[in-house]
Image: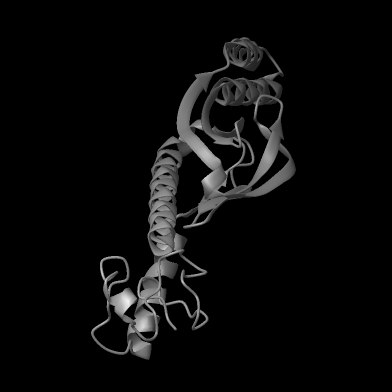
Amino acid sequence: MFCQKCGAKNDDDARFCTTCGSPLAPAQESPKDASQADWTPKQSGPMSATTINADRGRATSHEQDSNQDFSASLIAFWVKGHMGVDDHFLTIEMQNTVFFGLIPAGRRKSRSPLENVSNVYLSKSYKFGAMIIGVLIALGGLSTVSSRGGFFGGVVLLAIGVLMFLGGIQTTFAYELNGTTHFVNLPFFEQQKASDFCDQVNAAIAKNQDSRNVGYQFQQFRQQ
């Protein structure tokens, strides 16, 4: 049978959809099942292939909209990592960074079930040590530029100082997984995109929780 919610195909004797967890209406309704119409909404007629494909297309489109690419560092902004969420998993695949978040180094990847994820939030932090060092380097670069024969070196120092200062401004995506807090540091210019993604993750967690609650209540009701 096909799930009336997401269109996925399931075994004929399945009670819940293996894709989205929604309750499945029985293939043949018995008197007992008829009394449980509130739990298993009936379908007015056979679901056509066009309807199934349309529902799957909407689900795929929603999942794609919840996937985001993020720059991992300020200097190598073209080096992208990926964070995504669907109805069941939170996926993190981002580069680690060194030297105040300026240079990408290494990579980490995780795929966490949404039922184990909680307390998702976004924060903005300032690393004053890096910012002060950046200002000092930038000032040294300015003084070197004005000196004779030191123009090129001064420009390089100025650029490094500015980048280090900006690298001290970080956006952090944080979430708890089984009671342990995980942090993903992002450049400051990714704040708006990270904020949108944070909202998407919280919405997916709430939807997943609602689906599991409905499934549990329905199972308890059937056992009575």
Residue 33 relative to residue 9: left or right: left
Residue 36 relative to residue 144: left or right: left
- Residue 151 occupies quadrant: top right
Residue at x-position 52% and y-position 49%: 114
In the rendered view of the protein, which quadrant contains the N terminus? bottom left
Count of labels in the image: 0
Residue 213 image position (x, y, % from top left): 40, 51
Residue 80 image position (x, y, % from top left): 60, 49
- Please state which of residues 68 and 111 is positioned toward the viewer in this rendering: 111
Residue at x-position 48% and y-position 33%: 119
| Vertical placement of residue 33 versus 28, above or below | above
- Residue 154 occupies quadrant: top right
- Please state which of residues 10 and 207 is positioned toward the viewer in this rendering: 10
Residue 187 image position (x, y, % from top left): 54, 33
Asked which colour scheme the image uses, the reply is one colour
Residue 135 image position (x, y, % from top left): 58, 12
- Please state which of residues 23 and 200 is positioned toward the viewer in this rendering: 23
Residue at x-position 60% and y-position 31%: 179
In the rendered view of the protein, which quadrant contains the C terminus? bottom left
In this view, which residue lies farthest toward the left?
44
